[in-house]
């Protein structure tokens, strides 16, 4: 589950693994990110995990190699496989971010995340206003409309909002910003979850109208080539 949009689909519930390999990765990864497998602890031995997940040794080893590549675990001869601290995790990995979303990111994590997201997206918006092409503008208007149409359907709404942010990074022309789609998607998903929680309160409708107006202002600033305005609006949206 690493393709764009896969993180947002967790808003509709836990995703079904496609095969035994992804099943083991998902179950162990979720357990580590949620804290059910604490940092510094050792994973059970191969025989126990093969029995628990009903997989072969080959499948188990490949799954653990994937988790090791993500920075979640480290295997050592005669010691076993242990869980690594968060400082070693690849936090730009869409799958790790999806597990964070499921387990509920801490306030401190969100503060750190927003600082990184804002710096990336403000720069992307400024560059997009300079380098955007007609097709980018068309797509931005399309997804802006989809965001309005799908306002009462959390997953399609979140996908439309994510696409706006993704097209902005595409229009920037910067390959590093284009590669930050997992960060954009996580930010959109966190905001949608927050709005769903706030739906119980009367101010939610006014807040939704404010966000809609800001997205409209973002698209129009990029369309007319106003980088400073585009960056300012994006800073408001991601702050």
Image (spheres, rainbow, N blue to C red):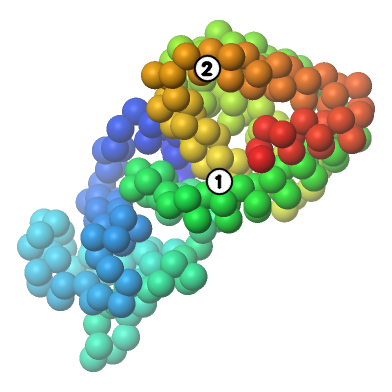
Q: Which residue is mark 1?
A: 182
Front residue (pair 71, 114): 114
In this rendering, the answer to whether 177 lies above or below 36 is above
Task: Answer yes or no: is residue 83 visible.
Answer: yes
- The residue lying furthest to the front in this view is 202
- Crowd band around label 1 with a 10 angstrom C-alpha radius: few (<14), some (14–19), many (20+): many
Which quarter of the picture shows residue 178?
Answer: top right
- Vertical placement of 157 versus 56: above or below? above
Count of marks, rendered view: 2
Q: Quadrant of residue 126?
A: top right
Q: Earlier in the sequence, mark 1 or mark 2?
A: 1
Task: Name the residue beneath numbered marker 2.
Answer: 203
Q: Which residue occupies the foreground of this view, 177 or 61? A: 177
Q: Residue at x 41, y 72 (%)?
A: 85
Quadrant assignment for the C terminus: top right
The quadrant holding residue 64 is bottom left
Q: Nearer the viewer, mark 1 or mark 2?
A: 2
Residue at x-position 82% and y-position 31%: 230
**How far across and down, in percent of the image, does residue 18 sit?**
29, 42
What residue is at 48 percent from the left and 26 percent from the top? Answer: 195
Task: Say left or right for 119 vs 228.
Answer: left
Q: Which element is circle 1 on? A: helix
Residue 144 position, x and y percent, is 66, 17
How far apart marks 1 and 2 lie (CA) works out to 30 Å
Which quadrant: the N terminus? top left
Pick whichever, 116 or 45, lies toward us: 116
């Amino acid at each position: 589950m690493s393709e764009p949009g896969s993180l947002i689909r967790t808003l509709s519930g836990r995703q079904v693994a496609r095969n035994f390999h992804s099943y083991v990765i998902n179950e162990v990864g979720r357990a580590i990110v949620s804290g059910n497998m604490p940092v510094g602890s050792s994973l059970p031995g191969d025989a126990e995990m093969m029995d628990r997940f009903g997989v072969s040794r080959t499948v188990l080893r490949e799954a653990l190699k994937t988790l090791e590549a993500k920075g979640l675990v480290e295997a050592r001869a005669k010691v076993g496989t242990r869980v690594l601290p968060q400082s070693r995790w690849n936090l730009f990995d869409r799958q790790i971010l999806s597990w964070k979303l499921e387990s509920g990111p801490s306030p401190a994590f969100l503060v750190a995340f927003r600082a990184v997201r804002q710096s990336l997206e403000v720069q992307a918006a400024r560059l997009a206003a300079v380098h955007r092409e007609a097709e980018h503008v068309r797509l931005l208007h399309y997804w802006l409309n989809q965001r309005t149409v799908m306002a009462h359907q959390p997953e399609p709404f979140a996908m439309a909002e994510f696409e706006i942010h993704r097209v902005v990074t595409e229009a920037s022309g910067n390959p590093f910003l284009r590669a930050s789609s997992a960060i954009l998607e996580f930010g959109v998903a966190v905001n949608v979850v927050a709005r769903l929680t706030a739906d119980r309160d009367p101010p939610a409708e006014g807040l939704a109208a404010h966000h809609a107006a800001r997205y409209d202002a973002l698209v129009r600033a990029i369309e007319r080539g106003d980088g400073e305005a585009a960056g300012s609006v994006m800073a408001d949206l991601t702050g």
